[in-house]
Image (cartoon, rainbow, N blue to C red):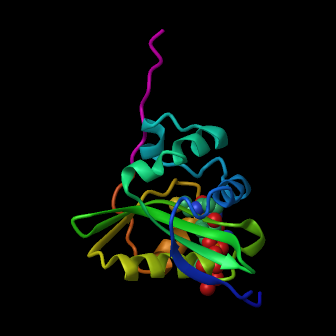
Amino acid sequence: MVPKPFQVRKVTWKKINGQWQELVRASYHKVYDGIGAMYSRVSDLESKIIAMEHYPEYGIHVWGAFGKRKLIGLIMGTLDHSVYVIWDLFVHPEFHRCGIGRALLKTAIRDSRCRTVQAEIREGNVPSQQLFLSLGFDAKYSATLYESELV
Ligand SMILES: CC(C)(COP(=O)(O)OP(=O)(O)OC[C@H]1O[C@@H](n2cnc3c(N)ncnc32)[C@H](O)[C@@H]1OP(=O)(O)O)[C@@H](O)C(=O)NCCC(=O)NCCS
């Protein structure tokens, strides 16, 4: 596919309010969230959006990809002691496989000047696994969450 023009830049959460929700609604899927999100009781799209509304409280760093001024991709995470932990990465399905995910990841890594980058990727999320592998990431751990509802 011929890459469509897009631009990646650092943004504030406030500036993209209204747009990020639309992007998440278009890109979220059932093997998206990892164990970390589940500790925050995120289990579906709506609980994901509610959790994300609180992100500014955690000091996240956000980069957006824009095409014709519209938000079409997003990466965000926290930076702590040179470790950049990616919380979320979304590219609008209409623009998949145009190099936007790779560009977002590379820009966030470069701009954050981190020494280590970490991301949690679910077992069935093959596009994401392939993206991270293509940039030299190694799979370090895999885990299963055990849960019991005590009523
Ligand atoms: C994962 C995701 C961000 C990739 O974004 P993208 O812009 O389509 O990815 P890119 O075009 O930059 O692809 C870079 C590389 O990733 C790999 N890749 C991306 N999509 C792939 C797919 N569907 N199948 C296999 N490999 C894939 C390829 O190695 C690709 O390189 P290539 O096109 O030169 O072969 C996107 O699919 C997405 O938003 N998915 C839904 C949300 C999600 O799961 N996010 C990840 C959370 S950890």
Q: Main secondary structure of the magenta part?
A: loop
Q: From the viewer's perspective, is 12 left or right of 117?
A: right
Where residue 122 sits in the image (x, y, percent)? Answer: 52, 53
Q: Residue at x 69, y 82 (%)?
A: 98
- Closer to us: 110 or 125: 110
Q: Residue furthest left?
A: 81
Q: Was residue 150 drawn as part of the magenta stretch in this picture? A: yes
Where residue 4 sits in the image (x, y, percent)? Answer: 74, 86
Q: Is residue 5 above or below residue 141?
A: below
Q: From the viewer's perspective, is 15 left or right of 137?
A: right
Q: Residue at x 62, y 79 (%)?
A: 100
Q: Is residue 29 above or below residue 79?
A: above
Q: Is residue 109 visible?
A: yes
Q: How many marks?
A: 0
- Closer to us: 43 or 12: 12
- Closer to us: 30 or 15: 15
State which image quarter holds ligand 1. Answer: bottom right
**Residue 36, located in which quarter of the rendered image?**
top left
Q: Which residues are magenta?
A: 143-151
The N terminus: image quadrant: bottom right
Q: Residue at x 37, y 70 (%)?
A: 138
Q: Is residue 17 above or below residue 97?
A: above
Where residue 23 sits in the image (x, y, percent)? Answer: 69, 60
